[in-house]
Image: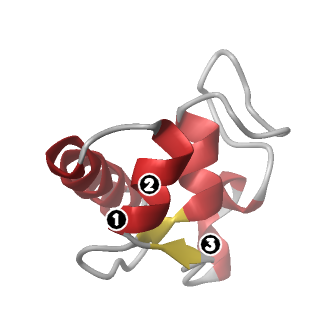
Amino acid sequence: MLIDIDDVIEILDVGTSQGYKIIKELNRELEGMGYRVIRGRTNRRYLLDRYGLAEGFNSDRQEFAGDFSDKGQGNKN
């Protein structure tokens, strides 16, 4: 599920500027893993994983225990 700036601000309790930086950084990471992204939106599960808020969070940050562990399955956004 894709989320926008308002969701990022609410989830992480950050300001607008910081929220956009976070979206940009996460989308750059997702693109590097072969996913397609939409500017100004990011994947909710990936955001939660990267900030340690997801059930499937791997503290070693090797891989997400959810959909992102197998990038060969096509577009997850």
Q: Is residue 65 left or right of residue 60?
A: right
Could you give the CA–CA distance between mark 3 and mark 1, rounded to whole angstroms?
A: 28 Å
Residue behind mark 1: 5
Image quadrant assignment for residue 42:
bottom left
Q: Residue at x 48, y 39 (%)?
A: 12
Q: How many marks?
A: 3
> Do callouts 1 and 2 mark residues in contact (Cβ within 8 Å)?
yes
Could you give the CA–CA distance between mark 1 and mark 2, rounded to whole angstroms?
A: 5 Å
Disc with the residue nearer the chain's start (3 vs 1): 1
Q: Is residue 39 left or right of residue 65?
A: left
Q: Say which amino acid is labelled 3.
A: Gly
Q: Nearer the viewer, residue 72 or 14?
A: 14
Q: Relative to 24, say whether 25 is above or below.
A: above
Q: Report x, y in % for residue 34.
A: 41, 68
Q: For the view shown, which residue lies furthest in the top direction?
A: 60
Q: Report x, y in % for residue 65.
A: 79, 44
Q: Residues within 10 Å of mark 1 (few under 14, many from 20)?
A: many
Image quadrant assignment for residue 20:
bottom left
Disc with the residue nearer the chain's start (2 vs 3): 2
Q: Relative to 39, say whether 55 is above or below.
A: above
- The numbered mark at residue 72 is 3
Q: Relative to 22, say whether 40 is above or below.
A: below
Residue behind mark 2: 8
Q: Say which amino acid is labelled 2.
A: Val
